[in-house]
Image (cartoon, grey):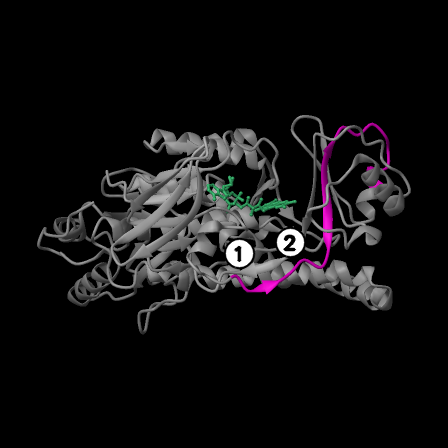
Amino acid sequence: MNTDVIVVGAGPTGLMLACELALVGVRPRVLERRTAPQRDSRALSLHPRSVELMDQRGLLDRFLPLGRAVPGWHFAQLPTHLDFSALDSRHAYTLFIAQAHTEALLAERARELGVEIERGYEVAGLSQDDGGVEVRVRGGDGSVETVRTGYVVGCDGGRSVVRQSAGIAFPGTDETLTGVLGDFAVTGTGLDAARARGVLVAPLEDGLTRLVYLDPERLRVPAGEPVTLEEVRASLVRICGTDCGVGEPRWLSRFGNATRLAESYRRGRVLLAGDAAHIHFPAAGQGLNTGLQDAANLGWKLAAEVNGWAPPGLLDSYDAERRPVGRAVTDNTEVQTLLAELTLVPRYQRPATALRALFDELLGMDEVNRTLAARVSALGTAYEPTAPEADPLAGRRMPDIGLTTATSDAIRVYELLPAGRYVLLDLTGDPELVPAVTPGWGTRVTAVTVTGRDDHPDLHGVTEILVRPDGHIAWATRTTDVRARRAERHEALTAWAGTGAGTGAGAGT
Ligand SMILES: Cc1cc2nc3c(=O)[nH]c(=O)nc-3n(C[C@H](O)[C@H](O)[C@H](O)COP(=O)(O)OP(=O)(O)OC[C@H]3O[C@@H](n4cnc5c(N)ncnc54)[C@H](O)[C@@H]3O)c2cc1C
């Protein structure tokens, strides 16, 4: 097992990445400055594509009992919600689950895969040369040691030391407003009134209630200023006429809308993922979800590079694919913030209220709702294909159709993905495929002869399909000519899974 990667930060992104790397033979060192896991949860949502990701990795049985499925999510706190249940997925719902659970489950999985999470170690800086990265690590006793490694991934949150040390700019806008979050025992009435006035009210598993709000009179308070219970009570009275009987909070936090996107997700041997690469207002609950998807996109590519078989450009495709997603997420959170912020500015109060009503009306239209739901759920994420004349399916996510294969009775596509390899599906049932592929790419590609499958409109006419380890489609063909198909397959496998085809020479991990 190769240990040539340091992951900085054991938040959800770093933990997911550690699992993804270890799954395919790279056991990273994970350095985390906190001495114990975070108990309080900022995020409460695993959106549909993240739920699918856990399914692809065989982890869903662990997550489902700790969460609650909800059919949709809000957009800009508008009354009409995004309807995820209308989307094409077996998991067309958001799993309402505390971030602390998500982190605990991913940490457990990382440990099973042999990863040690080294707590109490803070990365103080780094420098890189052509052959590696020197990382300065401060231990709990204050001593600093320098560690050399092949690659570093900064999963160290919005203030990322990794990003700063690598000299990667973080352009964007400073905070212009802040909101407040608190977890309380609520004894009074008034939660409905609070909801009606735009306060986000979410029941938590332990009987507490999460309240999140923007108080027009306290919008400019800096995020760094502590929140007090008295302040919350006064704000609630201002917003909805009652303090809802909120008791001593378990947790209070103020958060802002600073919005920034790293100018690049890679500089040489240093990469960024999660909040280290993008920060924004927590509108529609997308930050953690985006970080998990960053990790799922990066893990196998970085492992291929470390294991020595990555085809040219594979690792760079991480930035090319994920930065546009980061941009789209920061854009939609800014739109949502604007829809709230404008109503609080006296000059715009009336037109902004009309604008919100218009948006709400638009959300009532199926197509608009589906379009936005596909974005926020991340089910609509499709990567730009690089191959000329690629099939329209290339870059999109593979639907989880049911299959019958030459070797098993019934299986779903996602059940073929837990090993983190490519999956090559011959949809024509041709027994020639598996023997043709195995010699060259056997340990990187699971080749499957499909003898029967669920009908899916996107797959009509498709004869063969290569699914990437993250569940997106690398290549698809509709060619029926066997020789032409073989040539295309060879080219696609070489482009995605490296050279060595058919010779046996490329069968590395
Ligand atoms: C109020 C609020 C509500 C939110 N709700 C949602 C939601 O419902 N859904 C959603 O998807 N997202 C939500 N988010 C966003 C979500 O919490 C973050 O996007 C997510 O935590 C990012 O994960 P991460 O692993 O990238 O970074 P972090 O969670 O910030 O983890 C970074 C880790 O790195 C460690 N670290 C930092 N610096 C160093 C260093 N120098 N050396 C070693 N370790 C270091 C930190 O201790 C930390 O453990 C919300 C955010 C807020 C503020």
Question: Is 99 or 364 nearer to us in this picture?
Answer: 99
Quadrant location of the N terminus in the rendered image: top left
Q: Horizontal and vertical percent for residue 98? A: 59, 35
Q: Which residues are magenta?
A: 170-193
57 lies above or below 397? above
Residue that carries the numbered disc 2 in the rendered image: 281
Residue type at tag 1? His
Q: Is residue 425 visible?
A: no
Residue 278 disc label = 1
129 lies above or below 48? below
Give the residue displayed 24% in from the left and 56% down from the top: 310
Q: Residues within 10 Å of mark 1 (few under 14, many from 20)?
A: many
89 lies above or below 493? above
Residue 244 disc label = none
Q: Horizontal and vertical percent for residue 476? A: 31, 62
Distance Cα–Cα, label 1 vs label 2: 10 Å
Q: Residues within 10 Å of mark 2 (few under 14, many from 20)?
A: many
The secondary structure type at the circle numbered 1 is strand
Task: State the residue lying farthest toward the right.
Answer: 241
**Magenta includes 186?**
yes
Give the residue displayed 52% in from the left and 47% down from the top: 157
Q: Horizontal and vertical percent for residue 249? A: 74, 31
Q: How many marks?
A: 2
**Magenta includes 474?**
no
Give the residue displayed 89% in from the left and 39% down from the top: 242
Residue type at tag 2? Phe
